[in-house]
Amino acid sequence: MTLNNARLVFWVGALVSAAIFGWMTYDFHQQEEKYAHNSKIDEQVVAGKKVWHKYNCNVCHTILGFGAYYAPDMTKAYYRLGENNIISIVMEPEKVYRDSFRKMPNLGVSEEEARNLVRFLHWTADIENRNWPPQDEKYVKAAKMRADQPANVERTDIVLGTCGGCHSFVNQGRNVAGDFSDLARESSFDRTTLIRFMQDPQSVNPDSDMPPQNVTPETAGIIADFILSLR
Amino acid sequence: MTIQYQSQKVALPYMQLSLLLFILQVVMGLWLACNYAFTLPQGLVDVFSFATSRAIHTNLLVAWMLLGFMGGAYFILPVECERELHSTKIAWLQLILFAGAAVIAVIGFLFGWTQGKPLLEIPVPLDMVIVVAALLFLYNILMTVLRAEKQSVLQWMLVGGVLFLALMYLFGIPFYSSLNADYYYWWWVIHLWVEGAWELITAAIIAFVIIQVTGVNRKVVEKWLYVETGLFLFTGIVGTGHHYYWIGAPHYWLWWGGIFSALEPLPILLMVIDTWLHIRERKNPVVNQLIWVYIVGLALYHFVGAGIWGFIHTLPPINYYTHGSQITVSHGHMAFFGAYALLNLTVFYFALPQFKGIEKYEAKAGYWGFWTMAVSMFFLCLVFGVAGILQVYLERMLDIGYSTAHMMMMFWFKVALFFGVCFLAGVLTTVYHLFTLQPAVEARQG
Ligand code: HEM
Ligand SMILES: [Fe+2]
């Protein structure tokens, strides 16, 4: 090969690739609405994203799979945890993770910041990203369907999709506040109290550290039946 | 051998600072491993968190890499251009700006002053200082090259690589209101650096070192240089798509990103082959064998870390499961060490003896350092790989929850901590050796 041919390889290689990439970048922006629903980015989503950056959440948590691998991925956190849980975890991680193997720092996030964060995480969870991460897909499905078509969702997916951020059942979910098999045995709540406890724990037990759960009475009923069936 | 041009001396503080930051980076890494391996108390996590230490670990990595490249360029260009650098004053000013920004950035991280983007945490005002330093650097090397009697492929490849690097940095600075677009452009910095601009710089620098050390014909080396960098850019630019599979981008990225990135190992393989050919056809005698060990080590480790480890998880059906797991960590470490840490160390082993006018140096500690680093980094990456496979298998195939999976991984991070300590020992040995190079004792040469 002569030097001139080698130079040709360089320029053709670089420019062809750059041209394809340039076109694809143009098309990426054209299709952002379809995949990321950019028109739904409102002031709160932007404010929430700024909070996300301000506290450097991404350097412990991945989001869209990028960042650090030290803590759970946040892409679908909105569907995995729901609004109230995210707010409690972010504002009082030292309580939620008191007995956990790994701690999240209390970063001093204000309530308003936490609410904006939830809006940001909600927008993020709706990005059409080919169902990644794989382990969260069942929870996304459960969260979207548990209110109106509970019959079409696995019962454990409903339970763990709602409560799995802090409770576990047979290795699924996370055991930072007790496994349902144990809770079912230890707790003496009847069905009505259980449902009330889910929706407003402090009304049953004023000292409870458990945040109120974002569940409809129907979903709470399904979960209560599940827990009672374990007794 | 001594330096041929006085202005080359300005490269020395760059290289020394670079080595010190390397040590600090590794110390921070050990602390990160502790965070993974043990349950740390809330009180400690609240004041000095994983996030702070990871920001320091990764930013120091980038800083010592860039310092090494800049020092390397300042060392190489006078020889390559057969004249002094355009200005050593600018080089000093640039070093002070860059080092100042790095120090303020690290102190800032301790107090939570950050832009909040992984690897690009430096806040915007400090970004501006970096941009000024980069402009000074570009101006300085460009003037040096333009005023050279003879222009060479190598000079322009180096300048082009640096220009490409500096341009891409700009895409990481703005605030993007869409996370999706944010990460689209985040990879223009990270991917187009390590699989684009930095590869050009590496190819140019290593071509220079090979010409100098082996004495082979420049024409041949420069032909290889064109072909390799051409292939790097051809596969690497569209190959950026291997980061766009799961961010919410059109479907065709799976094909384009997958196929082009799967070809990325080819130019790295070519580098292995041409290094081997040039060494076989060397015209110069072997004076310091250690530098040859580094050159070959760089070529092979680069291929293993970036080429093989990258290829393993680059195709979409595999990446769906491995994405965002410790597998990525395994590859990141192997590739950064194999390609860029070894590149900088190769250049330092080429340059530092010349500052002292040492022809042949005592190399024993250097060998110990090299092998300790190379072997313990390999094991470290294997351990990360095991943790990653465990994570993927437990969380994503068996559907086991996060806590259970990660508690099972803690054991492997204790092992990682062990190899990390070994690696630090290797780094300290190497840096000590580089700082205290001594002429070889004649008797031992016999
Ligand atoms: C010396 C060159 C390279 C370096 C320094 C390097 C470094 C890295 C780093 C640090 C990351 C993680 C970034 C993050 O998410 O924080 C990464 C990701 C990745 N690299 Fe490389 N890389 C190199 C070359 C390659 C090559 C040649 C390939 C393909 C053949 C490759 C394939 C990948 C893939 C697929 C990912 C994404 C992993 C994921 O899904 O999370 N890399 N690389
Ligand atoms: Fe990449």
Image: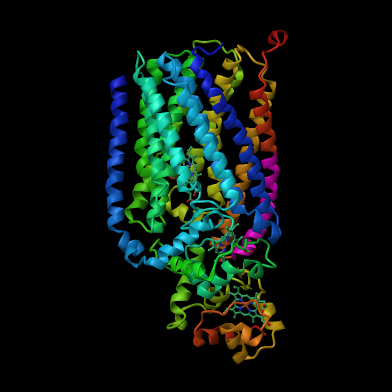
What segment is highlighted magenta in the picture? B401-421
Residue at left 61%, top 21%? B290
Drawn side of residue A101 relative to residue B201, left or right: right
Q: Does the magenta stretch include residue A223?
A: no
- Secondary structure, magenta segment, majority class: helix
Which quarter of the figure is the N terminus of chain B placed in?
top right
Could you say which quadrant of the image residue B197 lies in? Answer: top left
Q: Which of B196 and B377 is in front in this view?
A: B196
- B280 over B255 or under it: above or below: above
Please tell me how many numbered marks the rendered image carries.
0
Drawn side of residue B218 relative to residue B399, left or right: left
Q: Which coloring applies here?
A: rainbow
Residue B58 seen in the current view: no
Q: Which of A74 and B234 is in front in this view?
A: A74
Q: Position of residue B379 (x, y in %)?
A: 64, 40
Q: Is residue B405 magenta?
A: yes
